[in-house]
Image (cartoon, rainbow, N blue to C red):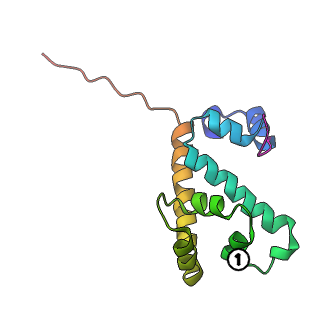
Amino acid sequence: MKQTFRNGALDDFIDSLSMNGRTSLLKLLEASALPEEELRFVEVTRLVRNAYAHNIEYADHSLTQLINSRGDKSRLIKYLSGIKTYDEAKLMSSYEKDPMFLRFCIIDSAMRFLFYAYHLTSRPKKKAKRRISQ
């Protein structure tokens, strides 16, 4: 949005939005027609970040350990992985054996989010009219 509007006051407004609530960044993304999967990816990324930032007990936990310890484990797996159909136990087992696979899935989801964010905020370029010579 900053790129499209180029407005300092709007930049400050967007930067000051909270993540949740009636007037939040998530509501803005939802109103911008961001697909549900991408919106939930932003939300669970915030949950993971907050777990690490606000609970010292998780400081020595790997991401898979953190996910396994939470009550919203299924939701975290679903939206961090970006995989539509999976067996949760097998997927977590594969993440534990190869943590790089989980990292790849998160990067893939982040790239999809950035793709949508870019296209939602950029203006379509006007196409030049072609002249038909007679």
Tell whether 122 sits left or right of 45. left
Q: Where in the figure is residue 83, as x and y percent of width and height?
A: 49, 61
> Quadrant location of residue 26?
top right
Q: How crowded is mark 1: few (under 14 residues within 10 Å), some or many (20 or more)?
A: few
Secondary structure of residue under mark 1: helix
Question: Which quadrant of the rendered structure holds the N terminus?
Answer: top right
- Specify whether residue 19 is painted magenta: yes
Q: Residue 20: x, y in percent?
A: 77, 44
**What segment is highlighted magenta in the picture?**
17-22
Query: What residue appears at the point 56 percent right and 84 percent down from the top-left corner?
Result: 97
Residue at horizontal 68 percent and vertical 73 percent from the top: 63
The structure residue drawn at horizontal position 62% and vertical position 46%, both measured from the top left corner, is 39
User: What residue did someone put label 1 on?
Assistant: 65
Q: Which residue is drawn at 23% across and 20% down?
A: 131
> Residue 10 or 85: which is nearer the viewer?
85
Direction from residue 73 to residue 121 in the image, left or right:
left
Q: Which residue lies furthest to the left in this view?
A: 134
Whether residue 1 is visible: no
Please tell me whether the stretch drawn in magenta is mainly helix, strand or loop: loop
Find the residue positioned furthest to the top: 134
Corner quadrant of residue 88: bottom right
**Kind of residue at badge 1:** Gln
| Residue 57 located left or right of residue 5 | right
Can you give x and y, in whole percent of width and height, for residue 3 in the image? 62, 39
